[in-house]
Image (spheres, rainbow, N blue to C red):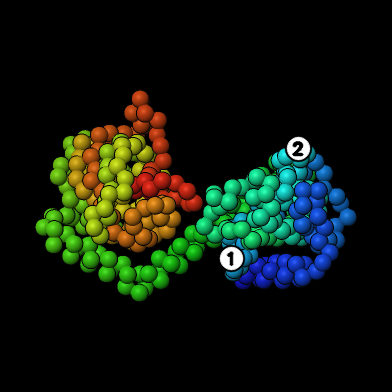
Amino acid sequence: MKQLKTVGLVLFTAVAFTACKNADFKTTSSGLKYKIIDGGSKDSTKTGEVLKFHVIQKVSGAKDTVMYDSYTTMPEYLPVQQMAPEQTNYSPMEVLPKLKKGDSLITILLVDSLIKKGQVQEAQLPPFLKKGDKITFTFKVLEVFKNDSLAMQDRQKEGEAYQKREEAKQKAIVDAFEKAGGKDKQIKDMEAYLKKKNINAVKSALGTFVKIDNPGTGTQVTDGKFVTVKYSGKTVDGDKPFDANTMTAQVGSGGAIPGFEDGLKQFKEGGKGVIYIPGFLAYTQGVPPGAPFKAYEGLYFEVEISHVGDAPPQQQAPVVMPQEAPKADTAKAGGKK
């Protein structure tokens, strides 16, 4: 699959390069330069249908930078619909509805034109853009679905396939990490940290260290139970705080980093203590933006458990465990995406 993605990127780059060398680009009424490479289909796209396509976005200036490549994730989907001119002005949306299955499209936007048209202010340009740069989008239409229902079914399949690829990729990273002795080293590093701080913590079978100030006297925390926990998270390196909250979540739902859930399972309702998590049981990917720690970095959480039950407290709806984000979540305590 990785080979196919690489081949796709090379082919797209070749198409874009060849097209950009040619002088037969067309220009829309707004000034957008574009070129459609016919894929051979005779069926024109109709309103109400849905395009499935890959897209690569590249910024060209002092150097070329690929800003987005859907081959590394999954295809995009776009319904074909009539749009007001102001909604499509100087954007690929002017041309996308013209595409058929198999077609390729290259569009070129000039940053200077975006500024001139008032679509962006020069002072507000992101760091990777400046006057004189151009933004190139290269599209490849994979399929055209007759309706949104068919497109949604396909999107779900693509999403599941992408998730499996990501899980396999992450497993390979973890396996390589363990094979190189990273897991054992992080456990020893955590033991050294606790010894230096004179902290008496018990190591679980999974590898989490837990300092139990009060084990609690109520219901035991186990998979499937709803737990309300007040927590505050800090880094082992430098004791830098990164989150504090009170939340209710279902343990074992797969939404939390392994060490956080494992640590909670060492308590009963009313329990209080500190969970020390070696990096391999913390954020191994998807570190929240702005977090003061890196992937595979050790963390610890001070926790106080006020509720353990088969259902969340009546006054509070269940929420997902604190999560590692994609792509744009805030740094939450113990979770992953």
Mark 2 residue element: loop
Residue at numbered disc 2: 84
N-terminal label among 2 and 1: 1
Pointer 2 local density, CA inside 10 Å: few below 14, some 14–19, many at least 20: few
| Image coords of residue 104 (percent x, y) | 76, 60
Q: Is 101 left or right of 204, judged from the image as shown?
A: right
Of 35 and 315, the residue lying toward us: 35
| Image coords of residue 55 (percent x, y) | 67, 58
Of 13 and 40, the residue lying toward us: 13
Of 165 and 129, the residue lying toward us: 129
- Above or below 172: residue 291: above
- Above or below 147: residue 110: below
Q: Residue furthest right?
A: 42
| Image coords of residue 76 (percent x, y) | 65, 52
| Residue plotted at (35% across, 74% down) | 180
Q: Amino acid at mark 2?
A: Ala
| Residue plotted at (32% across, 73% down) | 181
Q: Amino acid at mark 1?
A: Thr
**Camera sees residue 263:** no
Q: Is 192 left or right of 222, judged from the image as shown?
A: left
If the image is split into quadrants, where does the N terminus sit?
bottom right
| Image coords of residue 73 (percent x, y) | 58, 58
| Residue plotted at (77% across, 67% down) | 19
Mark 1 residue element: strand
| Residue plotted at (54% across, 59% down) | 128
Residue at numbered disc 1: 65
